Image (cartoon, rainbow, N blue to C red):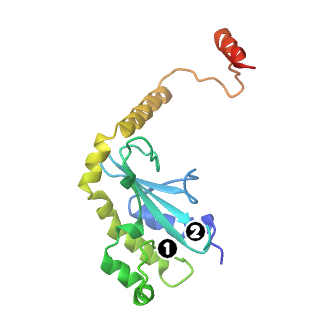
């Protein structure tokens, strides 16, 4: 049975809210909406469910840790380790338990996906979130790298500036406002034309 985003949200949203996450509708990054938790004054942890594109009855979720609530920014000097799938935070024994048949056959998968229509998959997913969230948050090297990242600092500063603009009394242009190019810009653009 094909898993629809709406159905997955119906199954996991209340459980993730119980764990302290806030739901954000329609994230542009994920196949599903995202959930975010403010960890302390500095850090946000996002958890974004993803429906498999080939096995459309399965889903997994990705964590993203940052001092901004920007999701999955991976450019500049942002540490790649900011984003990680749940399965990659499980240890060898936990993976062996989850993938008994695969390990017996000599295959050692690390990427864990759940089919919510089988057994207690949603309960297992929530238990893996409870198990792996502290692991994601306890990576001291990652936290230091996040603090060192100039790109993350720039994102955070841009976010603060945007918040100030929206909190100020400065009137914003209406949606019907047209913004025209200045004479200098028009001259430059026309001089670039062949």
Q: Is residue 41 visible?
A: no
Q: Residues within 10 Å of mark 2 (few under 14, many from 20)?
A: some
Cβ atoms at labels 2 and 1 below 8 Å apart: yes
- Residue 52 coordinates in the image, percent (x, y): 57, 68
Mark 2 highlights which residue?
52
The span from disc 2 to disc 1 (Cα, nearest Å) is: 8 Å
Question: To which quarter of the image does residue 42 belong?
Answer: top left
Task: Find residue 7 and report its image quarter.
Answer: bottom right
Which residue is farthest front?
Answer: 194
Query: Does any portion of residue 91 appear in the rendered image?
Result: yes
Counting from the top left corner in percent of width and height, residue 120 is at 47, 82
**Residue 115: percent from left, percent from top:** 54, 77
Q: Is residue 23 above or below residue 105?
A: above
Residue in view at x 30 percent, y 48 percent:
40
Q: Which residue is mark 1?
A: 113
Which one is in front, 187 or 119?
Answer: 187
Quarter the N terminus occupies: bottom right
What secondary structure is marked by label 1?
Answer: loop
Is 1 placed above or below 174 here? Answer: below
Task: Bin the neighbour count of mark 1 within 10 Å (Cα to Cα): few under 14, some 14-19, many 20 and up.
Answer: many
Callout 2 secondary element: loop
Which residue does the image show at 52% across and 20% down from the upper left? 170
Pick the quarter of the image with the C terminus: top right
State whether residue 179 is above or below residue 157.
above
């Amino acid at each position: 049975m094909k898993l629809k985003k709406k159905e997955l949200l119906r199954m996991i949203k209340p459980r993730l809210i119980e764990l302290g996450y806030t739901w954000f509708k329609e994230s542009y990054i994920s196949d599903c909406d995202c959930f975010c938790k403010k960890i302390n004054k500095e850090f946000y942890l996002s958890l974004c469910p993803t429906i498999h594109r080939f096995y459309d009855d399965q889903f997994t979720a990705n964590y993203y840790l940052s001092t901004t609530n920007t999701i999955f920014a991976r450019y500049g000097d942002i540490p790649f380790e900011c984003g990680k799938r749940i399965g990659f935070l499980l240890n060898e024994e936990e993976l062996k338990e989850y993938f008994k048949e695969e390990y017996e056959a000599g295959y050692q998968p690390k990427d864990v996906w759940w089919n919510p229509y089988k057994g207690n998959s949603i309960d297992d997913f929530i238990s893996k979130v409870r198990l792996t969230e502290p692991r994601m948050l306890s990576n001291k090297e990652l936290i230091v790298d996040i603090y060192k990242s100039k790109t993350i600092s720039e994102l955070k500063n841009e976010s603060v500036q945007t918040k100030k603009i929206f909190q100020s009394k400065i009137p914003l242009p209406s949606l019907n406002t047209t913004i025209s190019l200045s004479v200098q810009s028009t001259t430059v653009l026309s001089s670039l034309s062949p």
